[in-house]
Structures are given as structure tokens and as C-alpha cells.
Image: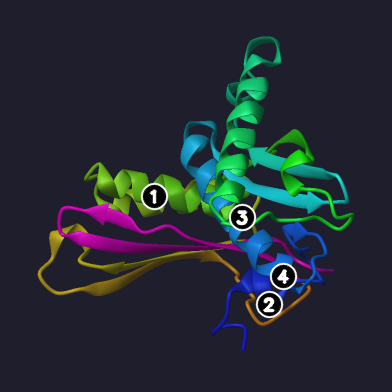
Amino acid sequence: MGQKINPKIFRLGHVYTWSSRWFAHKRQYKEFLLEDVLLRDYLRKHLKSAGFLEVEIERSINKMKLIIHVSKPGIVIGRGGSGLEELKKSLERFLFTFRMSQQKKVRNYSGKESGKQKLEIAVEPVKEPNLSAPLVALAISDQLVRRIPPKRACNQAVERVMNAGAMGVKVLLSGRINGAEIARREKFSAGSIPLSTIREEVDFAVSPALTKSGYVGVKVWICKKMST
């Protein structure tokens, strides 16, 4: 079972928690869900240089809180908090545009327009980027786009992850690797990755690389610690 599904979803409620935490009625659910997806895509695109990892979204009656996890928080915050204020204004414009495009007013739990919700942003630094599967996968895919040899890029990534204190790491490439005419799969691994053990903290990420020969899929598994 652990080999066939997303390792993080497999461990929801035991090791990991939900990244979106809110309650919605039937009419609101699809709108809030679409808003969360578009918001994550927006932040992933605009905060790529800051090492964007993930965003946690919490909604209450009249407040929406975003907890943004990045490896370089100084780029997001800016000098004197100017970058954070600019990000907040851009997010407010983005949310307002999205809600106006829904052809109807999205109402929150108290019956007021959700466009008047207070937006709160918190930036959390990533303690060890080399133990984060999304950041490692993104680094590998960027190197593949820049035509760095796949074997060297993956071996260096595996070495960095193990030196950071991981118990195990696995990198899987699939596609026309290095411009080959026939697609294939290559695996690079070190240590132990117990995918079927729910109590183990296994991080997982996918980051496809668009090369001149087509897409090359990059999957990364990282076991951060072993249970005792």
C-alpha cells in the first residue's frame, strides 16, 4: 500500500496535518478549494526565488491567515518589512479579482462578504532545506533544465541530503533522460526509506523538468527520522 500512494497523504493525521484548515458549507466548499489551489500556484510562482516550500491556510469568520514556509525569509520580508507589505497588497488584489470573477458573492460563515476578511501573513523559515523533498526536487529539475548531467545532479543531491542528517533518500528520474531517444527510468538512493511504516516521517515531492527533449519527471523521497 505504501508503494502506491503519496507518502504524505498516507500519513495524514499521524505524522502530517492538513495544509488547509477551515470549515465551509456546500456552496462555499468548491469556491474555497479553488481559491486555495490558485493561491498556492500564485505563491509558488512569485516566491520561487525565496525557496518557497508550502503555505498553510487557515480561515475563520472574518480572518484568513497564511503561514508561508520559505528557505530564504529575508527575501519575502524585505528591508523593514516592506516586502511583506507589498506581498500582502498583491495577495489582496489577487483574492479580490478571483472573488469578483465568480459571478456571485462568496459569503463567509457570518453572512458578510468574504472580500472584507482580514488577511494575515506569517513567514516561517525552513530550518534545513536539504531535508525538504520539494526543495530538493526543484533543485534537481532546475539543474536538468540547465543541461547539467542527470547522474551528477542526482548524486550530489543525495549526498547533500544524507549529510544533512536524513536516514534515507531516493531520487527517481523518468523520461528521455539526457536526451535519449527511448524513455527510461533511473533511480539514485541511499539509506532506508520505509514507505509502508506509517510512523516514519517520509517527505515526498514531484517536480517535472521541461528539457529540450521533453519532460523528465523528478520524484524525491526523504526519510527524516527513524522511529525508536
Seen from the viewer's position, the closer of residues 79 and 222 is: 79
In the image, residue 10 sits, relative to residue 52, either above or below, namely below
Residue placed at 63% from the left, 57% from the top?
Answer: 104
Q: In the rendered image, which residue does mark 4 sit on?
A: 27
For the C terminus, the image quarter is bottom right
How is the structure coloured here? rainbow
Separation of residues labelled 3 and 4 (CA atoms): 13 Å
Residue 140 got which mark?
1
Q: In the rendered image, which residue does mark 3 sit on?
A: 35
| Circle nearer the N terminus (4, 2) | 2
Seen from the viewer's position, the closer of residues 111 and 194 is: 111
Q: Dot 3 lies on which element?
A: helix
Separation of residues labelled 4 and 2 (CA atoms): 28 Å
Magenta stretch bounds: 200-228
Q: Is residue 162 visible?
A: no
Residue farthest along the bottom direction in this orientation: 1
The three-letter code of the residue at mark 4 reads: Arg
| Circle nearer the N terminus (1, 3) | 3
Residue 10 got which mark?
2
Seen from the viewer's position, the closer of residues 53 and 178 is: 53
| Circle nearer the N terminus (3, 4) | 4
